[in-house]
Amino acid sequence: MAFVQDKQRGKVGERIVRGYFESIGADVRDASEDTAYQAQDVDIIAADGITYEVKTDYMFCRTGNLALEDSVYSYAKRQSFDSWLWTSRADYFCFVNPNQTDRFVTIAASDLRHLVRFERLRRVEKDDGYKSISLYLLPFGEYRDCFEIIDY
């Protein structure tokens, strides 16, 4: 049940980002339900081929941090694996605060990975009942200039 809830909560951010692209007349395709793109952690594909992974961060407005999933341990599979931060084939990551529907931030995937590798970010563990997640917390205020802020 938790997986289904996570997926529904994530759809909020995907709708916001897709809505932005549609509002500026960009031709985009929702790939979030396409299993081939799910395996690549890609949610949106622009007509020019640029791909986006959208993360809806419900804690961002309270903490000021972006939660970046490093790895996941699945209790059901009894296995650990790298998370979207390292496995996504998206060109850009978009982070959405679901309480702010007219704004999101975006960063090139390669730039975000560089930050995680070379900056001293705090690392925490989160257990949601069906998996344990290792996260990096990126204090957005300190790294704001590394992101593009999209207002619409």
Image (cartoon, helix red, strand yellow):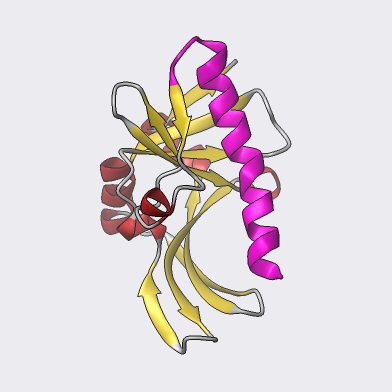
In the image, what residue occupies the spot 71% across and 70% down? 1
Nearer-the-camera pick, 6 or 141: 6
Q: Is residue 9 left or right of residue 87?
A: right
Residue 58, above or below 122: above
In the image, what residue occupies the spot 26% across and 55% down? 118
Which residues, given as a range, are shown in magenta?
1-27
Residue 87, above or below 55: below
Q: Position of residue 101 (x, y in %)?
A: 68, 28
Q: Is residue 80 magenta?
A: no
In the image, what residue occupies the spot 43% across and 18% down? 27
Residue farthest toward the bottom in the current orientation of the protein: 78
* Residue 59 seen in render: no
* Residue 42 seen in render: yes
Residue 119, above or below 133: above
Residue farthest toward the top in the current orientation of the protein: 25
Which quarter of the figure has residue 31? top left
Nearer-the-camera pick, 62 or 77: 77
Q: Position of residue 106 (x, y in %)?
A: 44, 33
In terms of secondary structure, what is the magenta stretch mainly? helix
Count of marks overlaid on the render? 0
Q: Is residue 10 magenta?
A: yes
Q: Position of residue 112 (x, y in %)?
A: 34, 45
In the picture, the quarter occupied by the C terminus is top right
Nearer-the-camera pick, 125 or 89: 89
